[in-house]
Image (tube, rainbow, N blue to C red):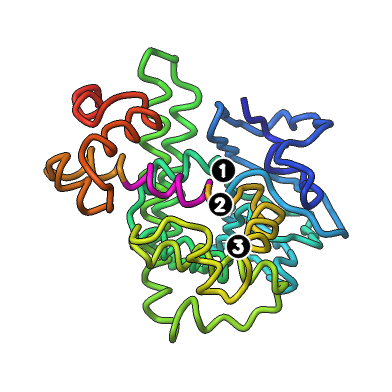
């Protein structure tokens, strides 16, 4: 189970995705956690750190009072009331300072959960890649009020009696918040010339290669599934791409390719009326039998059974 400090304690680069020692929770902090998500209603402290480190999850932090100064990929961000910071495992953090009156609302998702929610939707994947280069988002008063309303719902929900559908309702609220935030990101993306490609931020060449790989993977629409193909597009060797991808994200290119494919299959099975054969053809499987075996191996059921059980 993820805990509060799985996102609040930064991790040394390349050292995994879980912290060792935990800090005590403040009495006034309410939080919810399970194996894939964390909600912290009134986060008032984050650790100060001066060396490069990474987070273990994708975290969304809305500043409600005070200020947060944080360096992400070599760029300093001043986060004030009404601004979001969205950090993923791809980001490198190096400094943080908070004001005494700092207060925020924080949500965090494991990579797997975030992938399940986005569901392999190419447009949403592009928007999340845009966030990697633009981690701070300033929201309008109307959106701020909307997120505050969500927070009040969480406050009520976390004090509500638990029942057999408790976790499902929590996750439904989380999805709603995430989709509204991604919607705001989409607007910012449309208003940013050349969006992802225009980034001039000074992150490392390794990080830039990995981000470009993930962008290519999203834009490719599952036409290619070999590491060699993407390495060729980047003009580097497959071995080097595998090395830097593991160093920067904790996953190999093959794992990213397979995860994105599984997410897309799940999305198409649950959100479209396409037949199994049509999905198989769209995703480039050699035949329907191979598609069925792949789906059963990675989703636990055949395509037909998976649709029925959902």
What residue is disc 2 on? 60
User: In the drawing, does residue 261 fall left or right of residue 214?
Assistant: left
Does dot 1 land on a helix, a strand or a loop? strand
In front of the other: 289 or 41: 289
Whether residue 176 is visible to the viewer of this picture, yes or no, is: yes
Q: Quadrant of residue 201?
A: bottom right
Q: Nearer the viewer, mark 1 or mark 3?
A: 3
User: In the drawing, does residue 237 fall left or right of residue 186?
Assistant: right
Quadrant of image for the N terminus: top right
What residue is disc 3 on? 238
What residue is disc 1 on? 108
Mark 2–mark 3 Cα distance, whole angstroms, equals: 33 Å
Residue depicted at 30% across the width and 43% down the height:
265
Residue depicted at 42% across the width and 49% down the height:
260
Q: Is residue 85 above or below residue 291?
A: below
In front of the other: 144 or 310: 310
Q: Nearer the viewer, mark 2 or mark 3?
A: 3
Q: Is residue 124 above or below residue 18?
A: below
Q: Which residues are magenta?
A: 255-264
Mark 2 in CB contact with mark 1 (< 8 angstroms): yes
Does dot 2 land on a helix, a strand or a loop? strand
Mark 1–mark 3 Cα distance, whole angstroms, equals: 32 Å
In front of the other: 59 or 153: 59
């Amino acid at each position: 189970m993820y805990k509060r400090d799985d996102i609040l304690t930064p991790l040394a680069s390349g050292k995994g995705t879980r912290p060792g020692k935990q800090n005590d929770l403040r009495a006034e902090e309410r939080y919810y956690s399970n194996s894939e998500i964390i909600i912290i209603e009134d986060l008032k402290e984050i650790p100060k750190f001066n060396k490069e480190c990474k987070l273990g999850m994708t975290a969304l932090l809305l500043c409600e009072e005070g200020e947060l100064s944080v360096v992400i990929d070599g760029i300093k961000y001043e986060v004030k009331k009404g601004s979001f910071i969205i950090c993923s495992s791809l980001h490198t953090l190096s400094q943080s300072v908070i004001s005494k009156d700092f207060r925020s609302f924080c949500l965090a998702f494991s990579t797997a959960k975030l992938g399940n929610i986005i569901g392999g939707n190419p447009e949403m994947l592009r928007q999340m890649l845009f966030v990697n280069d633009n981690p701070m988002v300033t929201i309008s008063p109307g959106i701020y009020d909307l997120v505050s309303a969500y927070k009040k719902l969480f406050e009520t929900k976390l004090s509500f009696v638990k029942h057999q559908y408790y976790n499902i309702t929590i996750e439904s609220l989380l999805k709603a918040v995430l989709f509204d935030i991604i919607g705001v990101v989409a607007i910012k993306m449309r208003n940013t010339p050349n969006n992802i490609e225009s980034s001039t931020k000074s992150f490392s060449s390794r990080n830039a290669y990995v981000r470009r790989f993930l962008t290519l993977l999203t834009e490719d629409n599952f036409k290619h599934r070999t590491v060699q193909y993407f390495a060729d597009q980047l003009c580097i060797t497959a071995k080097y791409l595998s090395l830097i991808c593991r160093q920067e994200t904790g996953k190999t290119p093959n794992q990213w390719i397979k995860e994105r494919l599984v997410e897309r299959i799940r999305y198409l099975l649950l959100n479209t009326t396409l037949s199994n054969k049509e999905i198989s053809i769209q995703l480039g499987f050699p035949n329907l039998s191979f598609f069925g075996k792949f789906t059963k191996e990675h989703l636990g059921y055949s395509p037909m059974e998976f649709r029925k059980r959902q």
